[in-house]
Amino acid sequence: MIVTEEQARAYVAGLTDKEGMARLERFAALVLAENQRQNLIAKATEPHIWQRHIADSAQLVDVSRGSEALVKAETLGPNAQGPWLDLGSGPGFPGLVIAALCPNMPVVLVESRARRVEFLESAIAALDLKKCRVEGQRLERVAPFPARAISARAFAPLDKLLALSAPFSTRQTAYVLPKGRSAAQELESLKPSIRTMFHVKHSLTDPDAGIIVKA
């Protein structure tokens, strides 16, 4: 379990190289600076940004965990179909963290709030993430494409999220949906035919939080 900033930094450093760590250091600084102008993250979590936000996002692409990994290694590889799709990206968690860790993988961030779109676009430019882009509109207005994976953090209730993301989902699309303490309850609310496609895994950064997964 990752419970301190030191543990979080060490965990993330183990997932990337020096350049990747530098990108994430820069991103953390950008988030904290912008948080003085608009409410990107809760003020109480600022001293814990690596544990609460960056490591929490990075665990979604940690394929070193073997059978406990949330996505398969092939999902991140060059032969996977389509980009990684992150819904309701807000300040960039988890989508921009994923893009920073996997700069050669196409990533699409969907965010409809203008000020957050502006921040995301400036952060992408600052981190030189050439394969990451922002769709600055509601998901319903985005032209569908096949996604290799779909992530979302505090985007919508699970049933609505699955309905909205259906046009982007194929048989091969992975889902990784951090849902906090409501994960099991939200999964149980789905129709049995859909519910059996998903399962809940525990978060590395919060013992009470669950991540709904379809790998």
Image: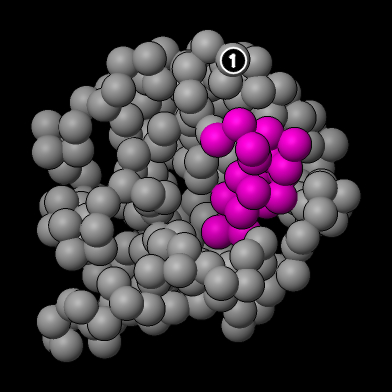
- Looking at the picture, does residue 4 appear above or below residue 134? below
- Looking at the picture, does residue 42 appear above or below residue 176? above
In which image quadrant can residue 161 be found? bottom left
- Looking at the picture, does residue 92 appear above or below residue 63? above
Q: Please indicate whether residue 214 sits to the left or right of residue 156 in the image.
A: right
Q: In the rendered view, how is the structure colored?
A: one colour
What residue appears at the point 51 percent right and 45 percent down from the top-left corner?
A: 94
Provide the major secondary structure of the magenta segment. helix
Q: Position of residue 83 (x, y in %)?
A: 38, 44
Q: Count the numbered circles shown.
A: 1
Residue placed farthest to the front in the image? 44
What residue appears at the point 57 percent right and 20 percent down from the top-left corner?
A: 35
Q: Please indicate whether residue 128 sits to the left or right of residue 2 in the image.
A: left
State which region is magenta.
42-63
Q: Position of residue 184 (x, y in %)?
A: 37, 78
Residue type, numbered disc 1:
Gln
> Is residue 179 shown to the viewer in this render?
yes
State yes or no: residue 90 in magenta: no
Q: Which residue is mark 1?
A: 36
Q: Position of residue 44 (x, y in %)?
A: 64, 38
